[in-house]
Structure formats: C-alpha cells, structure tokens
Image (cartoon, grey):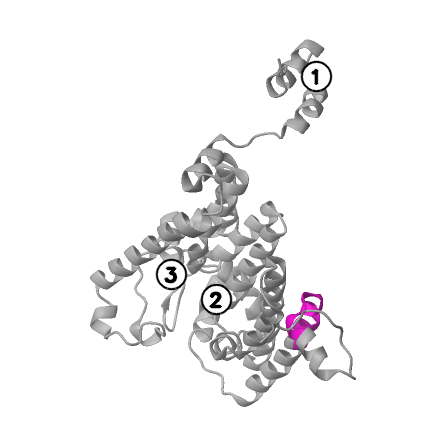
Amino acid sequence: MPRPTQGGGLSLNSPVQSTLALLTNPTYFWTLALLVVIGDTFLTELIIRFVPYTEIDWETYMVQTEVYLKGQHNYTMITGPTGPLVYPAGHLRIHTFLYEWTDSGRNIAFAQQIYGLLYLATLTLTCAIYRKAGTIPNWILLVLPLSKRLHSIFVLRLFNDCWAVLAVNAAIFLYQAGLDDTATCLFGAALSIKMSILLYLPGLLVILFKRRGLLSTLRHMMTITAVQTLLAGPFLSEDPWAYLASAFDLSRVFLYKWTVNWRMMGENIFLSQQWAKALLAGHIGVLVLFGLFRWCQDDAGGVLGVLRRGLVRPHVPPTEVPFLAWQSPYPVVVKYVPMYKFFPHPY
C-alpha cells in the first residue's frame, strides 16, 4: 500500500484529503496544535467541573507558606500537616503569590483555574518543542490530551511539579532556539521549585559541553547555583545547613503509597536500601549507554571526539580572527600574530 503524501491543502470539499494533510503535513502543524489546545481547554474545564478535587499537598503548601510569611526563615521550623518543608526556595516564592491569590489557599476552585492555565501553557510549550525538534509527525499531538495522570497532577491535586515542569519546558525550548543563557536561568528557576529537575541535568551537561565546551559549561552551572542562592537568600542567611539539608535532601525516601511506576513491588522491597542502590545503578548505566550510543554516536570521533573538542573550546572560527585582531588596541605587528597563526603561508 503506498504511503499517503504530505501534499494537499485544507478544504471543506475534500474532508479526507484535508484530514490527511492536517495529520501529516508539517505546514499544518500549528493548525492541529491549536485545535488540540482548544479541545484540551474544554476537556480540562470538564474535569475541573465534574471530577472531585483530591487533597494531598495543597493544604500543607499553604500552611508552610503562612509560617514563612509570619517571618520564619529557618527551614527546619517551616512545617505543615504532612511534615517539614522539603522543597527549595522557588517553591515557597511561588506559593506566596498563590497564598495571596487564593484567599490563603481556601479558594480551591480559583486555584484549579490557575493550574488549568498552567497546564495549557505547558501543553503549548510541548507543542513548540515538538515543532522545533522537526522530526515529530503532526498526529502525535493528538496523544497529548489523553494523559489522565497529567490532568490529575495539574488540576485535581495542584502539585508543585506543575510549576517546575513549565519552567523546564520553557528552558528546553530556549535551548533549542540557541538562547542558552536565558534557558539556564530558567533551568535554575525550575530546580529551585523541585529537586527532581536534577534528572534533566545529565542531558543538559552533554548539550552544553558539546555546544560550548568545558569552561562555558562550568559558567552555566555557576549560573544555576547563583539562581538558587538568589532565591534562597533569606534562608541561607538564617541557617544555610538547615536549608540545604531540607531543600536538597538526597536521602529522602519516597512513600510507597504514592508510587505509580513501582506499585507491583512489595513495600519492603520498595523501601529497601538495596532497591534504591539498584535503581541508582540502573539509572547511571542507562546514562552511560546513552552517552556512548545515542548522545555522541553521530559526532565525529564519538565520545572521545566530543571530550577532545569540549576540552579545547572555546575556539574562534578562522574567519573571525582578522576582525577580532584588528579591533584590538595593539600595534599592527602584534595584530598580525594571531592572523599568521590561523592563516599560515601555504608554501
């Protein structure tokens, strides 16, 4: 059977051809994306209207925010119904605004509308990322509104993950657009909301190292650290160790009753140190395999070639050397030295 062509336009007189073009022709990617976003807007409103809200962490977020607003800057003393505050300072900054906008957290319906807009913004960014990638067929967009879990996390449970995901998706889109510095600031903002954003870090390091080299990659990591420091200033001034131990506690154990992916495991196995170490080893192993056979496979020289080029950067393209040399304040003879180095005599 021959593959359908991507040609053809949209016409009410040719519904089959128009549907095929909408699903397969990249020209109509944003047309389909707009329809998906509009459709998901109605779906999200129906979910808010007819599916009961589930209280899990929202009340705790609001109580902890209230403690902070009363002047408490020691992280170990900021607690709520489910325990102490365990998220970085960006989380608290966002929920300070939500506390004010939702009548101290009591106006759940308005909070759900805010998170509904947050979901739609994230959906739109996801479409933009897919489009920028250039290898995603239009029809894949139809799958995006089908996630029961995403709708639940955003508008039925009001988790702080939603803000972190929006920020990191915005960062990914800006990295795709080549706006690395702005993207890194947004990545830092995402990390300041929830520590799980660290899972994106290995891929980001590979991209920055390949694109910018070692020194620039280190500068981007310093930017991420600076964003954390800026947002956490009052808490670091009060008790830096209390803040770091609470906000970035790598030893914290996830409760078995909230797991989805590993529900098939018994609770004893799920909470065991052996299982945690096995998961960590498996994660590191997958990252190594991706580094060897995916992230660096298409680069000249493979992993070693990427390392070699990353360690010698930054380099200046030869065509820019004369311009940069001539802009320097040095004598003509000195200006000629870098040009001679990059453009040696052919004989």
Label 3, secondary structure: give it: helix
**Circles 1 and 3 in contact, beta carbons < 8 Å:** no
Q: Is residue 267 left or right of residue 12?
A: left
The kind of residue on which mark 2 rests is Asp
**Which circle marks residue 161 in the picture?**
2
- Tell me the residue at 36%/74% (across/down): 260
> Quadrant location of residue 275?
bottom left
In the picture, the quarter occupied by the C terminus is: top right
> Quadrant location of residue 107?
bottom right
Label 1, secondary structure: give it: loop
Q: Residues within 10 Å of mark 3 (few under 14, many from 20)?
A: some
**Which circle marks residue 91 in the picture?**
none
Instruction: Report which residue position mark 3 lands on.
Output: 77
- Tell me the residue at 61%/79% (across/down): 40
Distance between mark 3 and mark 2 Cα atoms? 23 Å
Residue 267 in percent (x, y) is at 24, 74
The kind of residue on which mark 3 rests is Met
Say which of marks 3 and 2 sits in front: 2
**Is residue 117 among the parts visible in the rendering?**
yes
| Depicted 121 relative to depicted 76: above or below | below
Instruction: Report which residue position mark 1 lands on.
Output: 329
| Depicted 62 relative to depicted 237: above or below | below
| Depicted 345 relative to depicted 175: above or below | above
For the magenta stretch, what is the residue range?
22-35
- Tell me the residue at 58%/61% (across/down): 135
**Circles 1 and 2 in contact, beta carbons < 8 Å:** no
Distance between mark 1 and mark 2 Cα atoms? 52 Å
Q: Nearer the viewer, residue 251 or 187?
A: 187
